[in-house]
Image: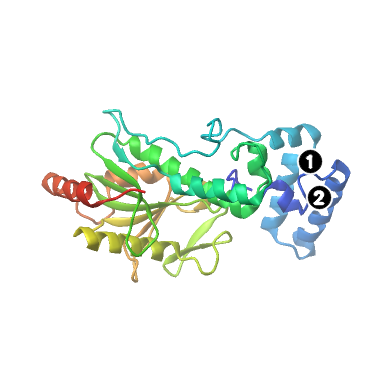
Amino acid sequence: MTDSIAAPTPYEVLGVPASVSPSDLRVAYRRMLRLTHPDTGGDPAQFLAVQSAWERVGDEEARAAYDRGYTLPGSGDAAGCARRAPGGGSALRARSFGVAGGLARDEYARLVADWGGAAGRNPLDPAVVRSAPPELRAVLAMALAQEETEQLVLHLGMGYIAWHEVAVTGAEPLNHVVLGPSGLYGLRSADWGRGVSVVRGDVAGEGISVDEHPLADLARQCGLLGRSLGVRFTAPVLVVPDAALAEPIVMITHGPRAGAIVVRRSLLPRVLRDGVHGAERVSIGRVYDLRTRLLAGLRTL
């Protein structure tokens, strides 16, 4: 199990509601152990997940600590799930436009209101988040992933400029556009709560539906935006949690998405500083030209 809020909760792994009694919880644990045990034909990964779930909620003290949860960014806002303020302002930080994760936070707040399980409570209250349906937690996880990326980019310094929640005609908004000495990048920040891998030129995993094509969609967004502005992106970059990717960086080398990158979140600053292997660094004059075009043409939502 991962610490992502998009991942199945221990209660979901054990197949019980969060309100389950201690005795019924133990019964469920033993049942799931039998069902998932490799010696009886079960899946080893699921067997380990069941044991991990029990470690988190199996005894009274551990369960109480889990149920209390942890403080999410913005959970103390009076508005509950209000958009976070942009991170720009310091001369030592990258220049920043737009609010990373703002659209996903707005969607999460709307979904929680429709769900009705948090009447009168902060949507970011850990207890509310823990009890929310998986599809709602997945939306909030995406918002938090985008905010994590925003912070990493801000700390790259004043040589970088970033736009978040960028409008793209004919496609969904692009999470991030980042310009720096190593090039121009279109980024998507994602957290599916489970591991991902590259299969036939795109990203796949247990948390990704069969009709989702994350890299294809990201490449299309970059293509549409680049053509509308008369610029060319150095690479589309998909950013995922460190625990979600077995390899530090995966570059697509063949097919229509050649040059796209999937990277562990902690290594994103290195990619944005050092550039893409085999790609030429952008000249200072070209960076200024790109910055002028982007400042004039990009629209954040």
- Label 2: element kind: helix
Q: Verify CB contact (< 8 Å) between mark 1 and mark 2.
A: yes
Q: Which mark, residue 29?
A: 2
Decide which of 180, 167 is in the foreground and name it.
167
In the orientation shown, which residue stands out farthest toward the left?
Answer: 285
Mark 2 surroundings within 10 Å by alpha-carbon count, few (fewer than 14), some (14 through 19), many (20 or more): many
Which residue matches tag 1?
A: 58
Q: Amino acid at mark 1?
A: Gly
Q: Is residue 154 left or right of residue 239?
A: left
Q: Position of residue 84 (x, y in %)?
A: 44, 36
Q: In the visual, does 175 lie left or right of 69?
A: left
13 w.r.t. 81: above or below: below
For marks 1 and 2 on the same chain, the one whose residue lies earlier in the sequence: 2
- The type of residue carrying mark 2 is Tyr
In 3D space, how far apart are the residues under numbered discs 1 and 2 (Cα atoms)? 9 Å
* Percent x, y of residue 294: 22, 49
Under tag 1, what secondary structure?
Answer: loop
Q: 5 left or right of 211? A: right
Is residue 49 visible in the rendered structure shown here?
A: yes
Picture quarter containing residue 98?
top left
Q: Estimate how packed mark 1 is, as few (under 14), some (14 to 19) or many (20 or more) residues with alpha carbons within 10 Å.
A: some
In front: 31, or 169?
A: 169
